[in-house]
Image (tube, grey):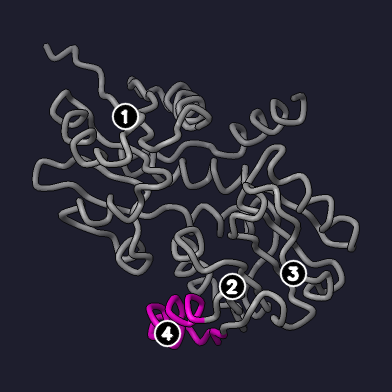
């Protein structure tokens, strides 16, 4: 009889703050799965070696957080379509025939917007702030939801244009208009605003004018907790429905859990519990 417990981890640097172990422990208890999920702090120059050691010791897979999502993409022998499109991987499964890389960030964000927040994106105008790894991870899934337009606003226009170039064919296939703009000149009256910049994490102000918000718009920051508070307060003050990134965090984790274990957990109950914890603190 094999009594080995399947091991998983969230790999990153820093990683002590990650709520992933708590989330996956709840998923495992809920679905009757036996596993251990820990944090794996990887040296900035030792990500690949850390993962290889973890896999050799019985690791079955891992979540990947900053700053290793691009490196994880390079390590995967097989990629999902959404990981290939993003050029980044946040979920690795250590299969015998080679590591499988996926990116569940976009699916998690889309589910949080359309299911949890009740906003169908089809036909809407979306403003995505930032053109870095966070935006690359979610853009494909946003396109798949077929909004009328997605405008990517970034401090440097060339980065926004480069991100559009990698997604242009996919957007054309789904009938979605992509456009690039600078943060100080990105237009007005968007139905959905998504902040994927590092402004909240850095404690900086909201990088766009309030005129980007249509009446009753949904304004979502990919951060959660105290870091997201200034953006959320700004959004509410200007009549928007404010939402943080906690729902995306739980939903992308549910996608990863299903990939690893073959069963879909109930993300809604876990999100509700974590929301109560976050509000209490």
Give the alpha-carbon distance from disc 3 to disc 2, as whole Å: 10 Å
- Which residue lies at the image location 45% right of the left edge and 32% below the top edge? 15
Find residue 273 and report its horizontal and vertical position in percent.
66, 28
Name the residue at 61% across, 79% down.
151
Label of residue 154 in the image: 2
Q: Are marks 3 and 1 in contact (CB under 8 Å)?
A: no
Q: Which residues are magenta?
A: 158-179
- For the point 54% across and 84% down, the residue is 178
Q: Residues within 10 Å of mark 2 (few under 14, many from 20)?
A: many
Whether tag 1 and tag 4 are in contact, CB under 8 A, the answer is: no
Q: Is residue 110 above or below residue 179?
A: above
Q: Does 221 appear above or below 180?
A: above
Indicate left or right for 240 with 136 as reference: right
Write down the residue under mark 3. 208
Mark 4 element type: helix
Residue sticking out furthest to the left: 97
| Label 3 residue SS | loop
Quadrant, the N terminus: top left
Per the model, the C-alpha gap separating discs 3 and 1 is: 39 Å
Is 7 in the magenta?
no
Q: Nearer the viewer, residue 238 or 43?
A: 43
Provide the residue designation for mark 4. 168
- Frontmost of labels 4 and 2 is 2
Nearest to the observer: residue 99 or residue 195: 195
């Amino acid at each position: 009889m094999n009594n080995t417990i399947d091991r998983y981890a969230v790999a990153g640097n820093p990683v002590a703050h990650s709520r992933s172990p708590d989330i996956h422990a709840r998923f495992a208890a809920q679905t009757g799965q036996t596993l251990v999920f820990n944090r794996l702090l990887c040296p900035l120059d030792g990500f690949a070696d850390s993962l290889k050691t973890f896999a050799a010791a019985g690791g079955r897979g891992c979540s990947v957080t900053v700053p290793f999502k691009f490196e994880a993409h390079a390590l995967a022998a097989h990629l999902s379509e959404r990981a290939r499109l993003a050029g980044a991987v946040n979920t690795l499964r250590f299969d015998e025939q080679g590591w499988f890389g996926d990116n569940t960030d976009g699916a998690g964000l889309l589910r949080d917007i359309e299911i949890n927040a009740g906003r169908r994106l089809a036909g809407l105008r979306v403003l995505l702030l930032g053109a870095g790894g966070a935006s690359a991870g979610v853009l494909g899934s946003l396109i798949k939801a077929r909004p009328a337009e997605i405008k990517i606003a970034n401090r440097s226009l060339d980065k926004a244009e480069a991100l559009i170039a990698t997604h242009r064919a996919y957007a054309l296939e789904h009938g979605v208009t992509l456009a690039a703009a600078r943060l100080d000149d990105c237009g007005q009256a968007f139905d959905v605003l998504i902040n994927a910049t590092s402004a909240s994490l850095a404690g900086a102000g909201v990088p766009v004018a309030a005129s980007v918000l249509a009446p009753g718009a949904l304004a979502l920051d990919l951060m959660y907790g105290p870091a997201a508070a200034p953006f959320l307060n700004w959004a509410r003050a200007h009549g928007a429905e404010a939402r943080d990134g906690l729902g995306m965090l739980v939903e992308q984790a549910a996608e990863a859990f299903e990939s690893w274990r073959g069963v879909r957990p109930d993300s809604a109950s876990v999100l509700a519990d974590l929301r109560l914890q976050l509000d209490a603190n």
